[in-house]
Every structure is written in C-alpha cells, then in structure tokens.
Amino acid sequence: MGRIFGLGETVLDIIFKNNQPVASRPGGSAFNALVSLARAGEEVALISEIGLEEVGEQIVDFLQENRVGTSWLHRFTSGKTPVALAFLDEENNASYQVYKDFPEERFQISGPEFRPGDILLFGSFFAVNPVLRNQVVPLLQKARDQGAYLIYDPNFRKNHLNNIAVYRPLIEENFSFAHLVRGSDEDFENIYPGMDTNEVLQKIGGFDAIGLITANSDGVYG
C-alpha cells in the first residue's frame, strides 16, 4: 500500500461527564482515522490547519508520538485552534459546543505531491465549507490527477441541515472527485431526505464512484 493522507479539520475535544471535565484529546474525522492507521503500521500524514499556540503544539506532539506525519499542517498565527466541548449523557452520547477563532485567510497550503498507490481520505464539514472551497478543490483535483485513490466520507450532521441547498451541490462535487464514497445511513438521510438505500447508491454511482452505506446493526450496503 502507498502512503495515506487525511484531509480535514483538527479540534481539541474537552469531554465533560456529570458537568465535570474528565479528559481532553485532539480529534477530527480524518485525524482519528490516521491515528488508527498509523498504530496499525501504515505510513500516514495529516493535511489540516491548527494554531501556532500551546494547543496546536500539544496536537503536533500527539501526532508525532503516534507517527502521523505533520509536514502538511498549516499553522496560523492569528486565531486559535478550534476547541469542542463534548457533554456526555448517561449513555455516553455526546452533544457539542464548538469554539472557533480562525484567521481571515484559511488553509494556505498546496498539499503534497501524490503518487499512484497513495490514498487520500477526506470528508466532514471541512470538505464542503464554502470558506475553504477554493483551497480544497484544487487539492482534490491534484490528488486525482496524480493517481491517488480518493475516499470520501460526507459525515454530514443535522446541525447543517438549514443550509442543505448550499451544501448538497458541494457534496455531489466531492462525489465526482472520489473513487469510493462511504457514509452512514443517517448521513445520507440528511443529504437526500426520503431516498432509500438503493436510490442513494444509484445517485453516487452516477458520479462514477463506488458507494458504501453503513447502517449499524443492519449491516453494510454497496
């Protein structure tokens, strides 16, 4: 297998239980996947943005300790690394409050030179954020042109539903870059309300991508 890159947001999660902070850890969709892959022995690197402050330094230390490459992190000097407060209920389900202080110019990085056999993981709100779109699209196109295999996880949550008319075309543009689209049934219910699994898979296939839908105990559809 080639190198594995992950493109996405990085946040510091502070976890509360019974109204008391019990832990803090860095995270993000691509971030978490890369840490797991690095621990399994794969060569991985994160493409993201974090602040040039103490929280950012702690995150870099964590990545390096877990053998995740940090050469493609954009470090901004004005603003702060995002912090998410995660409040756990009695069943350990989390509700979040996210605090962001980004600079006016975001994600000023061109990314690595890809090689055939490399894999690029991307997704979540980072991949459809209109503020980042002018930086994200050229990077996805570059990865595709240079022979990388692109895996897209929309990870689209209900808190963005009010603007689904804005985000759906961007999600579908991401389908067109991806070789594989993998998401949960809840993600696709948010993106395409009322569509059944087969209709969603046909929709993804219309963009020449392979679709996989996970449905918890109900299995995987593709």
Image (cartoon, rainbow, N blue to C red):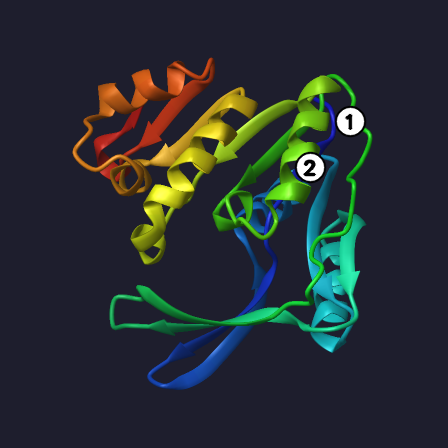
Residue behind mark 1 = 114
The number of discs equals: 2
Name the residue nearer the viewer: 145 or 6.
145
**Which is more N-terminal, label 1 or label 2?**
2
Q: Nearer the viewer, mark 2 or mark 1?
A: 1
Q: Provide the secondary structure element on which disc 2 rests.
A: strand
How packed mark 2 is, by other alpha carbons closer than 10 Å (few <14, some 14-19, many 20 or more), is: many
Figure quadrant of residue 33: top right
Taking depth in this image into account, of 16 and 136 the one nearest to the observer is: 136
Quarter of the picture holding the N terminus: top right
Q: Quadrant of residue 193?
A: top left
Q: Whole-Å distance between the Cαs marked 2 and 1? A: 9 Å
Q: Are marks 2 and 1 in contact (CB under 8 Å)?
A: yes
Q: Please, what secondary structure does the residue beneath circle 1 have? A: loop
Say which residue appears at 68% left-offset and 51% top-offset.
48
**Nearest to the observer: residue 19 or residue 7:** 7
Residue 5 disc label = 2
Image height of 164 relative to 173, above or below = below
Q: Is residue 62 visible?
A: no
Residue at left offset 59%, top offset 26%:
150
List x then y, in percent, for residue 46: 70, 46
